[in-house]
Amino acid sequence: MNRELHFTQKLLAWHRNDNKRIMPWKGEKNAYKVWLSEIILQQTKVEQGLAYYLRFLETFPNLRDLAEAEEDEVLRLWQGLGYYSRARNLHFTAKEVQAKYGGIFPKSSTELIQLKGIGEYTAAAISSFVNKEPIAVVDGNVIRVLARYFRIQLPFDSAEGKNFFREKANHLIDQQNPDLYNQAIMDFGATICKPKNPDCAACPLMDSCLAKQDNLISELPLKTKKVAIKKRYFIALYIETSHGIALQKREEEDIWKGLYQLPSFELKAFTKNLELQVNEILKREFPAEHFKLIELGKMQKQKLSHREIQIVFVHLKSQNEQILSDSYIYTRNLAKFAFPKVFILYFQSKGII
Ligand code: SF4
């Protein structure tokens, strides 16, 4: 038996022998539910995504319900998951599939990939799971397993590497059971051939794994690029006014688009004298206003994919009766709005929500 066939058969046998991770979307043939689970899991761990998946299905049991929802409602439900463009795309695509395809997802991966928020991986997952299209999913788990088992020493993030891994994965897929094969390799990567400390002793492929034979496990897969992390600095004002707490909606093409925040101001950097920086902002933005400083908070951090957000929360009380700005929303119920995670943590630390 050739090496490729051996790999595929061993993997399917491992999966058949009850090594499956139990999840509600496994074996699902409803395209809406598969799509929903795949979008939620794009940058989220299964343990965290599960509760969101169930909550979304409870609120929007089918595509039409999601298509007809308000974007704010979708974002509020998504709150805490991060990468909010996923939620906006989810809503956009629900409306598009409803309007353009009569509420039925297209069947092939080439058509699915035309929809917003659906990339190569997600298209392959949906079309193989729902319609048994023999197209392989290629994500970090799959790349790791293939790179190690076949000792592939091409950087997976180079153009050549990407093509190579895609072709290899498509060559290996079981034509009769592409759904089971894709599920098997994803589960195998997540539970056995893990990034750190793979469980080689429990691996059905150990005897023929080339990385194991050559002691290359910790070096594979190879990567070329190191993505630079950009730091951004914000002062966020928690202002108590006689009309409620002041909020802004983030409308620009930037992080957290569509979410709400406390009035926030970006700086080039924090200096040693933070209070002075805060006073400069207050003087510039609210020249006629008087504030009482309640608390100058400590710097908080939130890591996004290529950015690190550093943010200082300042608790103020407005001494005037008039509103601070027409562009703000004033509320006494913060729980009604969707916020970025770092804001939620701040509210929770103050016992506000
Ligand atoms: S032997 Fe270890 S490194 Fe090789 S495929 Fe199995 S778990 Fe991965």
Image (tube, rainbow, N blue to C red):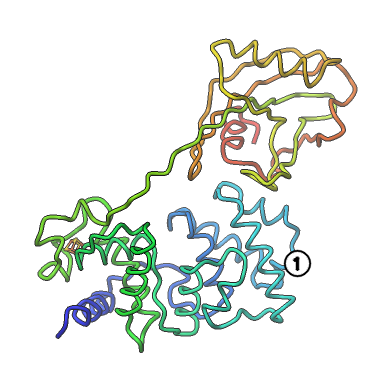
Q: Nearer the viewer, residue 321 or 158?
A: 158
Q: Tell me where residue 118 appears, x and y as whole percent.
A: 55, 67
Q: Tell me where residue 292 appears, x and y as whole percent.
A: 74, 12
Q: Quadrant of residue 65?
A: bottom right
Q: In which quadrant is the C terminus drawn?
A: top right
Relative to 48, does residue 279 appear above or below in the rendering?
A: above
**Left or right, 167 with reference to 253:** left
Q: Quadrant of residue 331?
A: top right
Relative to 35, does residue 296 appear above or below in the rendering?
A: above
**Left or right, 9 with reference to 117:** left
At horizontal 70% and vertical 71% (from top left) the residue drawn is: 96
Q: Tell me where residue 326 appears, x and y as whole percent.
A: 87, 33
Going by the numbered disc 1, the residue's amino acid type is: Glu
Q: Nearer the viewer, residue 351 or 181?
A: 181
Q: Quadrant of residue 2?
A: bottom left
Q: In which quadrant is the N terminus drawn?
A: bottom left
State the SS at label 1. loop
**Left or right, 130 with reference to 182:** right
Q: Tell me where residue 108 appears, x and y as whole percent.
A: 53, 82
Q: Quadrant of ligand 1?
A: bottom left
Relative to 156, does residue 168 appear above or below in the rendering?
A: below
Relative to 333, does residue 71 appear above or below in the rendering?
A: below
